[in-house]
Image (cartoon, grey):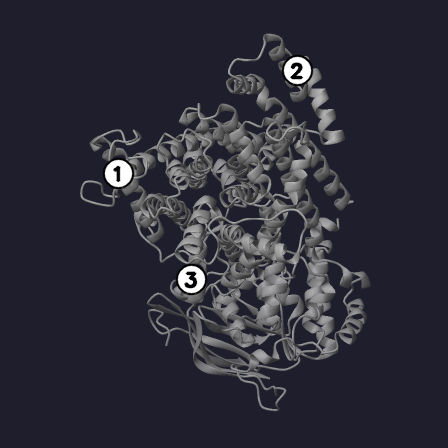
Amino acid sequence: MGVLTYVAKRLGLYFAVLFIGLTITFLLPRLMPINPVDGYIGQLQGRANGMLSVEAIAELRANLEELYGLKGDLFSQYVNYLRRVILHFDFGPSFTYFPQQVSVMILNALPWTLGLLLTATMIAWLLGNMVGLVAGYFHKHKAASVLEFVGILLYPIPYYILAVTLLLLLAYVFPVFPLSPTFPVGQMTPEKIGMIFYNSLLPGLTLVLAGFGWNILSMKALAVATTEEPYVTYARLKGASNWTRMTRYVFRNALLPQVTALALSLGMVFNGALLTEMIFSYPGIGLIMRTAATGGDYNVLYGAITLSIIAVATAGLVIDLIYPLLDPRIRHK
Amino acid sequence: MIRLCDLKISYRIGSRVINAVDGVTLTIPDGSIVGIAGESGCGKSTLMKAIYGDIQAPMHLSGGTIEYGLKGADGRPVTPATIRREWFKSISYVPQSSMNSLNPVIRIRDQFIDFPGTDSNKKRVLERARDYIGRLGLPPEALDSYPHQLSGGMRQRVMIGLATFFQPELIIADEPTTALDVVVQKEILMLLMDLQEQMGNTILVVSHDMGVHYQVTHKMLIMYAGRVVEFGDTESVFADPQHAYTRMLIDSLPTIGDDSMRGAVASAAGAGGDRAYRVEAELIEVKPGHFVARPAARDGAPA
Amino acid sequence: MIVDTKDADPVTMVVPPAPKARASLLWLVNPRLAVGLTILGVMGLGSVVLPLFAPADPSVQASYMRNLPMSQAHWLGTNALGQDIFWFLVFAIRNSLTLGVVVAIGVTIIATIVGLSAGYIGGRFERAVMLVVDTFITIPLLPILIILGALIRGNTSFLTVGFIIIVFGWAWDARTVRSMALSLREREFINMARFSGANTLQILVREVFPYVMAYTLVGFINTILFAINLEATLAVIGLSKVEVPTLGSIIFWALNYNALFTGHHVWLVAPIVATVTLFLGLFLTSTGFNQAFASKRGVA
């Protein structure tokens, strides 16, 4: 019973979040002082050097409003918007790459982002937690303070600084990696895959380092607290080995709040991934967003942000659904 | 038979050294339940830790000896340095009932087999465990449960099960019934007595509750300020207490002691406390099997 | 997100063992806090005082010869836009810090109100509020900022960015405050104080406030960090008003003008060093306070 209620509640929250997120995305452009249609028309006029007739402009405006979903009153716009997005995942065409559908563009870029993000986050989480665990369990040793210090050094450094610093160090000072990485597209050959992998190492490393520090610190604090728990002391008095105590007792229990923390931090991790992509020109959602932002391609932006919300919410959902598997107190009764 | 000879256990705090156990000489006979009473800070927990062999910084054995009268797996007599290897083999421990001493995320049956005391054949151990817990008044499903699914009383039975399963010669029970309600308390105590009768081992019961001692123990040990004040058969001690402190304890049934001081280092009784109760380390036999300590010389300075 | 743990923020969880007992106000001082406050003090004071001595508005381009190396006249040299790097950096620190503090104030006020009310009132109100909070936490802030940056396109005043960060950034702290409110509700010492006859004001001042102050202070500093970070992130990708000197915009320009390729590392390295130092200062101050409060409470 406990599990079902938990899952139901969690799913409810998920859909609520998605719904509110979609609504916010819908409202966003409509609350802005600048009408994107005007902006675009302005751009076109500039390029056409005033050679557009008034009728042409009016027709263009009508078409644009259709495409943007800006026709009709607010409520019907909302309904149309919801219908389009939820049923067809349709965000309209991109402007810069007309008539390429935004959804196609996004779905092409998504695997890149997911690949980088998931891999890097998992590595950072696993490594960071293991280091933190050892540092926390053996916190009386000098070495533990050193490890904690590493965490302290890494944690406050923002993503972009890390990215730029790594770029400096590993692509400029010691030219191990290319300064402007290239990512071949199209048919995958082993050679291309190798190249992709090689060029992804630097952005990947950035993400890993960024997450690593936080994981070390939080896990260490948790491990220290958990090691003081009565059941760990009892295990010691039973004669259980250090390894058993560290893994089956301390880690299994300290893991639980860490998993929750991971779920809560997904938004920030995603931000970091986007940023890293932009700095390294990695062909994921981040890069698409950046080009779209400078080019005024609003449909792409709305599509990307909707996708971001879906991605983060879903990842959070998955993690929260995994949680009962780890904590029997939720699973039973 | 456990022999303590002028045992001294000290804590080092900053530059001060506090003798939590300050010269205890005692012989604990086999096959009996010995109760240890005294208020918080009198040194009883430290004494138990020392006997169990759980001595780590800032605590250390600063004087005296402990003879266990046991032989280890290698055939040689067990000493305080080697007693660790006997944990949950020839010596075991029942923790305070208020503590959650079971790993909340692992099934109980797995906690029967995750330490070296057990047989290397885990399956066999589990089968025997399943048979065994029935005798403790636990349903067979208890082994497959998680700790939070059992009540406090059931959990304490599990702890007793764990402690007695390997038939140790000595069991130390530290406040085994505190925080249990009265009915469950009685059941647990009866269980302990039954098991002791069946196995013929020695159980040391630490409690600040004199009522517990009266119900369960064969012999009583009263401690104050790190020293033994009185020791003898329970009946004798309760009927004819020789020391003023003992009398005070018995008079203030059912419970005495300030629980908020629980866990405080000996400073409470050792470095302060009512000087009228301080004693010398030596015990005098006033009646057959009934020992008492002399009041400390003059201004309470321990001899 | 339904399973409520005390706090996911490692800053509030990094509680190292307390140092030896100290007397009177010295409990506040520990090495971390000292170092952190020193860094912040120097940078903060510098960013407020120094601009008074600035020879010119450092954001004006072509004030000087381009790409001059470090010298007496130009402590960090000049950049490809003809701006003095050192003065630009000083103003940048000032602007970033100002933004950080303004946002932190806004966020703390909103988060405290929302969190406390949710925690104390409970019931349906709490659930509804937490739903909103969780939504805001889930929505990744960067894409929103990107869109807004694109829409408003550098016509934003620098503080509009701050405003937007407040609007979307209060959620995390609200969650923390609510957890605090929940645990306070259950705390024995509040009831004990009440029963012992202390009036509400006394309780608030002597029991509630010290407990809350710790978290609020720590949260405040963390938010400064967060805000500066976010604004700089936006600037680095060129979506805020990059003419205004901030830590992020320096990096933006340096990257844009390929400072790496052209060998003008100072332009890029200086803001990196400044940013890292500033963040380290904020972080150390934050954990320093945390450690001090924890050891005072006797928790560590």
Mark 3 Cα shell of 10 Å, populated few (<14), some (14-19), many (≥20): few
The residue that mark 2 highlights is A74
Element assignment for label 3:
helix
Q: Position of residue A282 (x, y in %)?
A: 55, 45
Element assignment for label 2:
helix
The residue that mark 1 highlights is C46
Instruction: Give the residue type that dot 2 points to.
Output: Leu
The residue that mark 3 highlights is A146
State left or right for residue A235 relative to residue B65: right
Instruction: Give the residue type that dot 3 points to.
Output: Val
Q: Position of residue B48 (x, y in %)?
A: 54, 72
Q: Which quadrant holds residue B287? A: bottom right
At horizontal 28% and vertical 35% (from top left) the residue drawn is: C82
Asked whether the residues under marks 3 and 1 belong to the same chain, the reply is no
Q: Disc 1, disc 2: CB below 8 Å? A: no
Specify the quadrant that holds the C terminus of chain B: bottom left
Specify the quadrant that holds the N terminus of chain B: bottom right
Instruction: Give the residue type that dot 1 points to.
Output: Gly
- From the viewer's side, name the closer residue of C231 and C269: C269
Mark 1 Cα shell of 10 Å, populated few (<14), some (14-19), many (≥20): some
- From the viewer's side, name the closer residue of C87 and A121: C87
Tell me how far mark 1 sits from mark 2, CA to CA: 51 Å
Mark 2 Cα shell of 10 Å, populated few (<14), some (14-19), many (≥20): few
Q: Position of residue A249 (x, y in %)?
A: 62, 62
Considering only vertical position in the picture, is B158 above or below B118? above
Subunit bearing disc 2:
A
Asked whether the residues under marks 3 and 2 belong to the same chain, the reply is yes
- From the viewer's side, name the closer residue of A324 and A264: A264
Is residue C188 visible to the viewer in this orientation of the structure? yes
Is residue B239 visible to the viewer in this orientation of the structure? no
Q: Disc 3, disc 1: CB below 8 Å? A: no
Tell me how far mark 3 sits from mark 1, CA to CA: 32 Å
